[in-house]
Image (tube, rainbow, N blue to C red):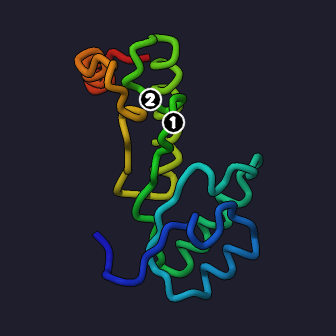
């Protein structure tokens, strides 16, 4: 899939990607990266994403993984249909972002923190709805 080399989460280098960070990443020995939605949270017009993509293509470096956030708004196992549908919609949008960067690995937590009173069967069924294509 990719050559072995030094890898890093972009978040560990800089939580919020700015132009100077792209230049620093380009000049670093890091060859593979994990991205998260937060890396580009202020990139409203897509210019930083485009610049990061150009840097990857120019250097042969790779964004190999994309880490989906872990919060209630991302919990597509939520038994509350309103929250689940919103999470599925957000998940699909984030998948498009991951594919835009050609990330081949998606890190996903299908549920928020375990609650001892939680009905795991209901949450598992909600996840299966996503898999079967019946969700949102």
- Local packing at callout 1 (Cα closer than 10 Å; few below 14, some 14-19, many 20+) is some
In the rendered view, tell whether residue 17 sits above or below residue 133: below
Give left or right: position of 79 versus 46: left
In the rendered view, tell whether residue 65 sits above or below residue 92: below
Q: Residue at x 53, y 21 (%)?
A: 86
Mark 1–mark 2 Cα distance, whole angstroms, equals 6 Å
Give left or right: position of 7 versus 39: left
Residue 77 picture location, percent across and down: 37, 24
Q: Residue at x 68, y 66 (%)?
A: 51
Kindly indicate whether the residue at mark 2 contacts the one at mark 1 (C-beta within 8 angstroms): yes
Farthest-out residue, left: 121
Q: Name the residue beneath numbered marker 1.
A: 71
Q: Name the residue beneath numbered marker 2.
A: 75
Which sits in the foreground, 77 or 94? Answer: 77
Mark 2 falls on what kind of element? loop
In the rendered view, tell whether residue 39 sits above or below residue 128: below
Residue 106 picture location, percent across and down: 37, 50
Give left or right: position of 31 versus 27: left
Which sits in the foreground, 123 or 53? Answer: 123
Quadrant in the picture for the N terminus: bottom left
Q: Residue at x 51, y 29 (%)?
A: 72
Residue 34 picture location, percent across and down: 47, 63
Q: How many marks?
A: 2
Mark 1 falls on what kind of element? loop
């Amino acid at each position: 899939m990719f050559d072995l080399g030094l890898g890093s989460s972009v978040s560990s280098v800089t939580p919020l990607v700015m132009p100077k960070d792209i230049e620093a990443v380009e000049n670093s020995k890091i060859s593979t990266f994990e991205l998260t939605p937060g890396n580009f949270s202020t990139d409203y017009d897509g210019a930083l994403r485009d610049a990061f993509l150009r840097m990857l293509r120019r250097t042969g470096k790779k964004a190999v993984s994309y880490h989906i956030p872990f919060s209630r708004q991302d919990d597509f196992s939520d038994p509350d249909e309103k929250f689940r549908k919103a999470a599925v919609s957000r998940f699909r949008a984030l998948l498009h972002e991951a594919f835009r960067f050609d990330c081949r690995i998606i890190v996903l937590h299908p549920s928020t923190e375990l609650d001892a009173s939680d009905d795991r069967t209901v949450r598992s069924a909600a996840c299966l709805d996503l898999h079967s294509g019946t969700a949102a």
